[in-house]
Amino acid sequence: MPFKPAENPKCPKCGKSVYAAEERVAGGNKWHKQCFKCGMCGKMLDSTNCAEHENELYCKNCHGRKYGPKGYGFGGGAGCLSMDTGAQFQGEGTNGHFEPKPMSKAPEGEGCPRCGGYVYMAEQMLARGRAYHKGCFKCGECKKGLDSVNCCEGPDRNIYCKVCYGKKFGPKGYGYGQGGGALQSDTTTIEGRFGSRGYGHSGISSLGLMSDARDLDYKSEFAPKPSAVDTTVIKAAQGQGCPRCGGVVFAAEQVLSKGREWHRKCYKCRDCSKTLDSIIACDGPDRDVYCKTCYGKKWGPHGYGFACGSGFLQTDCMSEDQLASQKPIVTIDTTVIKAPQGQGCPRCGGMVFAAEQQLAKGTMWHKKCFNCNECHRPLDSMIACDGPDREIHCRACYGKLFGPKGFGFGHTPTLVSTDAQAAPVHTDSKPANGPKAKDGKGCTRCGYAVYEAEKMLSKNRIWHKRCFSCFDCHKSLDSTNLNDGPNGEIYCRGCYGRNYGPRGVGFGMGAGTLTMA
């Protein structure tokens, strides 16, 4: 005998079968979840606010308005006189429903694709850049409400749930039914011709239960084709379709790679046609996709150690000229690449690249040129000193060339002189020669230029180390006994107190001393 499915209860609202996963029970009847709403105001109901009357559902407010008591005390509040007899709901064919208000139509192509009305932000649902009303956002076949998870846009520019999309546009044939091994056919064709004899809609193979010759004739005559719709033949606009075949790519079959949409069956290696996924896919410079192996052969590095095994020389896809160009060559001496005037290495004048640059006072040097100009000792940022001759020196050579001369300034207690003449001894704090600095740029006391190796700081003013002494007693100062006077000079503590300190009993050299200086 042919297989007969069990009878399911019918929904009183729409008359269709109600299954266990979506049923709502009220008044001894079973309703669909989307049909379980008030017949007057359309409000969705639940078990706490549902009222049933003659196979029609109402919320408590609408049920009271239509079938509740009328008169003094039964209105919206105590003492309210309600004379509503419900006559507006007794018209023929209304079944308690309000007539919908006419919807304002939007300009062509700007409104809801289903009803053509204006779509406002509070009720819009988006699908491929088009805005639907929340009530219109349902499957074009079964009218099931949709959301962003189960919405599929078909090639006819309509929207479907995943099940109806698969039935209408998905692959057909053995293994694509709702159960393993089921033969899925389009229900609109077979059910229309054979009533309830459509096969391919149960969890087991319906064909296994048909043994008579007439059912076998149905199978052979109406067997579905391997594919209902080949979407690759639907050509897209230039530069917008699948990069491999040029067809329109719909949401149910799209695969993304570098911002481009591919058909799932077109997403395979260009060379070996291996099916790809997000793990093994590689985008080539020719805007095509490859597996990792083919990408390495075609675009990866070639030569000793870069093939399938260590020591294997891989030279496929390379000409003799390409092989000759990739042979190792002698390292280029960048010092011979001359830079524009004033932009290269100060020592050799060559171009300085990022991998070998060293910085000193805003100028860039080659790493091998960054050494002392006198003893050629390699330098770093800790021992490099910039001299007034725009060269760099180590600290020892800088001290010999530009440091103070005389007793106590050499290798203690050696007297160091860099020329044959006797080292000059300065009796005052000002040097005898040297370049004068600009106004406010040099030493506060002598006015000559101050270099980093001999700089001393006092309240944002710079001094030579030899000039950094008390203005009165000429005692050498440091940060522990320094006092800045109001006349712009510096003093030791004793001289500062005598010149600018408080006077009177108790403020002299010792307790009780009266100082009137």
Image (spheres, rainbow, N blue to C red):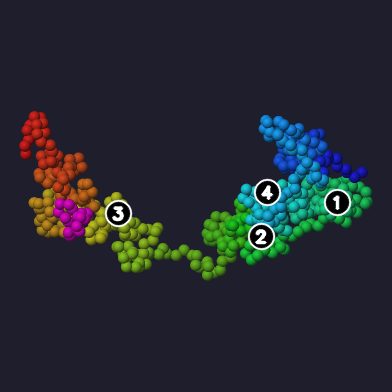
Element assignment for label 4: loop
Residue underneath mark 4: 134
In this orientation, which residue lies closer to the viewer: 299 or 278? 278
> Which residue is disc 1 drawn over?
191
Q: Earlier in the sequence, mark 3 or mark 2?
A: 2
Q: CA distance from mark 1 to mark 2?
A: 40 Å
* Residue range corresponding to the magenta coloring: 435-451
Task: Check residue 328 in the rendering and tell me which mark sits there, or answer none.
Answer: none
Q: Earlier in the sequence, mark 1 or mark 4?
A: 4
Quote the CA–CA distance across marks 1 and 4: 32 Å
Q: Horizontal placement of 145 versus 444: left or right?
A: right
Q: Amino acid at mark 3?
A: Leu
Query: Which residue reaches farthest top?
Result: 512
The residue positioned 71% from the left and 40% from the top of the image is 44
Q: In the depicted view, which residue is nearer to us: 370 or 196?
A: 196
- Pointer 2 or 4: first along the chain: 2
Q: Please check the rendered image and state whether residue 445 is part of the magenta-colored stretch, yes or no.
A: yes
Name of the residue lying farthest toward the bottom:
321
- Amino acid at pointer 2: Pro
| Whole-percent x, y for residue 452 in the image | 24, 52
Question: Residues at badges 3 and 4 in contact (C-beta under 8 Å)?
Answer: no
2 vs 4, front mark: 2
